[in-house]
Amino acid sequence: MAQALLEGTKLRLVFEAGMDNEGNPILKAKTFSNVKKDVSVDQLYQAAHAISVLCNDMLYKVERNDSSEIIA
């Protein structure tokens, strides 16, 4: 049976930086690497909110990106 070994976690913040000519949001992202693998969803959200307060743009969404190695 195959297993997945969690190798790393990244926190990605997506900001709304305005609107284009067609009224669609312009999105910009910032990714933070080396996030602790065992961090909770609440802790990630609190960190994202604290970082977004320091930015000029409005926080659009928060993503957690995990990468795993699949072994047999």
Image (cartoon, rainbow, N blue to C red):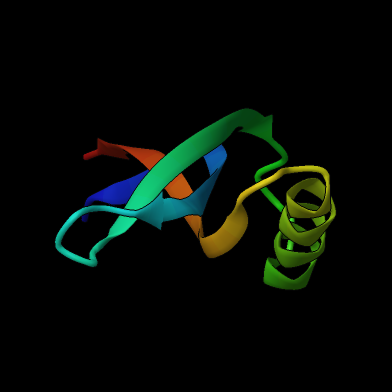
Q: Is residue 58 above or below residue 17?
A: below
In the image, residue 21 lies at what x, y percent? 19, 55
Compare residues 50 and 36 and report the one nearer the observer.
Answer: 50
In the image, residue 43 lies at what x, y percent? 80, 62
Would you say 2 lies left or right of 16 here? left
In the image, residue 62 lies at what x, y percent? 54, 60
Q: Is residue 25 above or below residue 67?
A: below
Compare residues 37 and 46 and report the one nearer the observer.
Answer: 46
The C terminus sits in image quarter: top left
Q: Residue at x 82, y 44 (%)?
A: 54
Q: Name the residue at the bottom extreme.
A: 42
Q: Residue at x 37, y 40 (%)?
A: 68
Compare residues 14 and 65 and report the one nearer the observer.
Answer: 14
Q: Is residue 33 above or below residue 56?
A: above
The quadrant where residue 5 appears: top left
Q: Residue at x 23, y 50 (%)?
A: 2
In the image, residue 61 lies at what x, y percent? 50, 64
Residue 57 seen anywhere in this rendered image of the structure: yes
The quadrant where residue 34 appears: top right
Residue 8 seen anywhere in this rendered image of the structure: no
Would you say 8 lies left or right of 25 here? right
